[in-house]
Image: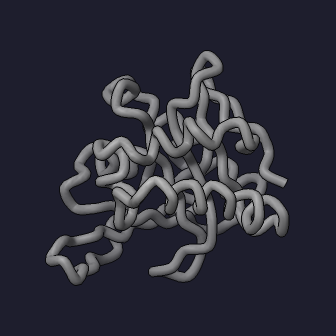
Amino acid sequence: MTPTLRTDRLLLEPYVPADEDGFVEFFTDARVSRWMGDGPWPEADYRATFARIFDHAYASDGFDVWVVRQDGRLVGHAEIKAAKVVEGHELIYALAPEMWGRGLGTELARAVIAHGFGTLNLEQVHATVAEPNTASLTVLRRLGFRHLRDIAEDDGTITRVLSCDRGEQQART
């Protein structure tokens, strides 16, 4: 069961069905979806993804996925789940554009990483980030992630693969 996490300014909690419209609105914002996988997608695909959170992530304890709130308002999304490009678990996080530049990305990522090392007892947490997403790359480096390799995507873009070890993270806190 995905636990509720709190930071100084954010609340991370499991999604509830009433979050569907907010989830879709969040991910159909091109400023958000451009950094999230192959987005943007059609609205119906985001609605199907939202349903899979309940069917696959929550129903089977498949992985932890959170809605991120500030003052009760949906302002982001976070996950920690089995990675596809490296062996282990991957951190995924996103914030609404109006939240950018306030240190909330660092706060959010730090909370999910701490959950991965503490609650899930992981030895490493990985992240994949589009090369032009310098804000996320900066956040992750600040939190102790190191560059492992680059992946050349079919469309010519580069995805950076990063990793953080439990020991490195503990040394920073």
Residue 107 image point, x, y percent:
51, 34
Q: Nearer the viewer, residue 75 or 104?
A: 75
Q: Position of residue 127 (x, y in %)?
A: 44, 63
In the rendered image, the residue lying farthest to the front is 44
Q: Going 39% across and 60% down the picture, which residue do you hit?
A: 41
Does 56 appear above or below 70?
A: below
User: Is residue 173 in view from this perspective?
Assistant: no
Front residue (pair 74, 142): 74
Q: In this view of the protein, which residue sits in the foreground, 45 or 35?
A: 45
The quarter holding residue 22 reads: top right
> Which residue sits at x=59%, y=61%?
49
Give the residue furthest to the left.
156
Residue 123 horizontal side relative to residue 44, left or right: right
Q: Residue at x 44, y 47 (%)?
A: 27
Residue at far top of view: 71
Horizontally, is 161 left or right of 94 in the view?
A: left
| The image quarter in which residue 132 lies | bottom left
Does residue 93 appear in the picture of this structure? yes
Q: In this view, does 110 lie to the left or right of 67?
A: left
Q: Where is residue 109 in the image (x, y as percent from the top left)?
A: 51, 44
- The color scheme shown is one colour
Give the answer, above or below, for where 22 lies relative to 86: above
Locate residue 47, reporting x and y percent. Answer: 57, 55
Query: What residue is at 61 percent from the left and 47 percent from the top?
Result: 112
